[in-house]
Amino acid sequence: MEVDISRIRVLASPALALTLALAACGTTGGGGLFGARDVGYGVNPDEESIDGLIVGHRLMAASEYDLALRAYLRAAGQQGFTADVLSALGSANLHLGRLNQSEDLLRKAVIEDPNFVPALNNLGVVLMERGNYGEARLFFQRAFAADSGQTDMIRENLMRAIAKSEDAVYVEPEETSRFTLVRRGYSTYELLSEL
């Protein structure tokens, strides 16, 4: 009597897959299928993790802003919302174009540490993007003073903010065009301008 092997494989596959899945759940270090911890593939729960700020800074340098934001959020979970973490979160949001979130986070970072140069500079950048040149100038001045004028980028930002804020204050009014009313016939008038 011959046995159909293909049929046995088909019937045995779901049972084998379930057995392998349950065995895999027990080996992740998470306490099995209903364990309290879910550990990702390739992660050793007994080792110390790399600082999320370092990972985030490297991702920012590689222009991976969304991934950097995730790393900074992980750092916030590990270290709390320090001035460095808040500034990093604000910077990532700035690069993602989320100006409102960036401004809120950077203002909190400045409250946490009033002399933290990256937060002061980045808040100035956000304010420049939003057209608040006068306030941006104040934050660039604070960053320049806290940095003792050592960073060229902060100096350039300050110069731009000064120029923009002075342009915004001393805008000359546009010349108004003059109109002349000219009679063209018995009851017809035409309005002419000097352009």
Image (cartoon, grey):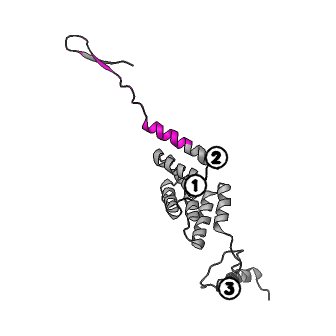
Residue placed most toward the observer, 168 or 130:
168
Tell me if 47 is positioned left or right of 189 in this view. right
The magenta-colored residue range is 159-188
* Residue 80 found in image quarter: bottom right
Q: CA distance from mark 2 to mark 3?
A: 56 Å
- Quarter of the image with the N terminus is bottom right
Residue 192 percent across, percent down from the top left = 32, 18
* Residue 27 found in image quarter: bottom right
Marks 2 and 3, the one that precedes in the sequence:
3
The nearer-to-camera label among 1 and 3 is 1
Which residue, given by chain and number where applicable, does mark 1 sit on? 146
Residue 135 percent across, percent down from the top left = 46, 49
Tell me if 44 is positioned left or right of 89 in this view. right
The nearer-to-camera label among 1 and 2 is 1
Tell me the element at label 1.
helix
Query: Magenta includes 165?
Result: yes
Marks 1 and 2, the one that precedes in the sequence:
1
Q: CA distance from mark 1 to mark 3?
A: 54 Å
Q: Is residue 44 above or below residue 74?
A: below
Give the residue type at disc 2. Asp
Which residue, given by chain and number where applicable, does mark 2 sit on? 152
